[in-house]
Amino acid sequence: MDTQNSSVRPHARSRNDGENHPSRGTRANTRSGGVIHDNSRHTSRFTVIGNHLAQHAELSLLAIGLAVHIQSLPGGALIDIRTLAARFPEGKTRIAAALRELEAHGYLRRTCERTSSGRVVTRTVSCNQPGRSGAASSAADAREPTPRSRRPARREGEPPRRALPAVPQPAYPAPDLLRSAVEVLSGLRRGDPRLLLSATEVEHLAPAVAAWLERDLPPSAVHHALTVGLPPEPLHRPAALLAHRLAAQLPPVPPSTPFSAPAAPDAVRHPLRNCETCDRAFRAPAPGHCRDCRPEPPGPYPAG
């Protein structure tokens, strides 16, 4: 009764055995000596991190860890250099360098914007998948609120449309600045139905409106400058008329402080930068340090 049937083939071992998949168990892999994963499923308080970040070939280990920490924070949490340096032992210099790495590879977007009180603040956006967001670039940010209306296709025998005149460009095309410019252009038709613009025309004119807003003008002032004194007859090319006004009536660049001398006609208004030490916004031709964090030059005589 207890004699085994010798003609039965032996059972094949399961491919899901722990020896074939050492990452699913705790048994040591004596042949390779590699890492062994003892994984448990998370049910609360976890953050999903892509392997494109965790195994990034160009980011430093500090930048990868800092990106993981930032992605795990709730919305509205402070991630400026001073706050991160108080939380971690690496110091401001190394943390600032890691933030620049993440910004260069698209995991962070930092833009400077002016509040209603006139103060310049830095807005930081964390991207868990660079390039997948609809606001991956300034142009994409500007196109999001644009109207969907398009001009009808050119009919047969109709002469080709002329290109719009060139328009001024902002010194620092921040996404929020371009978004405000698009809102100004999209609102012109509410005051005058003749100023209905296509999405292509809005995209062409938005940088010029941003150049006006960059000169500390409120959107209402730009709206008034574009709509006041329009001719009563029909406007055949409203976008060309607006482009001419934006270029011909561009206001001068305001001085940075009330006590500064007037700017020269050919003076360059440098874009806003983030200080590599304190993360404060300042204007400069290249990245670096603000006036308070810039090292003092050596004096002509030794101390004492």
Image: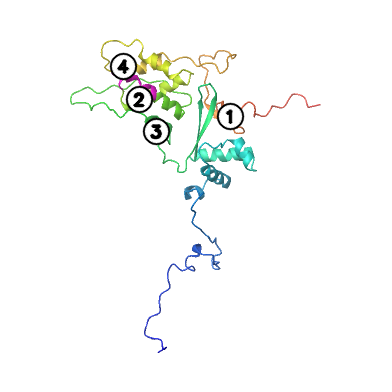
Mark found first going from the N terminus, 3 or 1: 3
Answer above or below: position of 289 versus 260: below
Q: Can you give x and y, in whole percent of width and height, for residue 145 in the image?
A: 37, 29
| Residue linked to disc 2 | 202
- Labelled pair 3, 2 in contact (Cβ < 8 Å): no
Mark found first going from the N terminus, 4 or 2: 4
The mark lying in front, picked from 4 and 1, is 4
**Amino acid type, residue under disc 1 in the picture:** Arg
Distance of mark 3 from mark 2, alpha carbons? 13 Å
- Labelled pair 4, 3 in contact (Cβ < 8 Å): no
Give the position of the N terminus as an image quadrant.
Answer: bottom left
| Residue linked to disc 1 | 280
Q: Can you give x and y, in whole percent of width and height, for residue 204 in the image?
A: 36, 25
| Residue linked to disc 3 | 140
Whether residue 206 appears in this view of the structure is no
Q: Is residue 10 left or right of residue 124?
A: left
Q: Which residue reaches farthest right?
A: 304
- For mark 1, does the 10 Å Cα neighbourhood hold few (<14), some (14 to 19), or many (20 or more) residues? many
**Amino acid type, residue under disc 2 in the picture:** Val
**Amino acid type, residue under disc 3 in the picture:** Ala
Q: What residue is drawn where x is 43% and y is 31%?
A: 138
- Element on which disc 1 rests: loop
- For mark 2, does the 10 Å Cα neighbourhood hold few (<14), some (14 to 19), or many (20 or more) residues? many
Distance of mark 1 from mark 2, alpha carbons? 32 Å
Residue range highlighted in magenta: 183-196
* Residue 273 included in the magenta stretch of the image: no
**Which is more toward the observer, 99 or 122?**
122
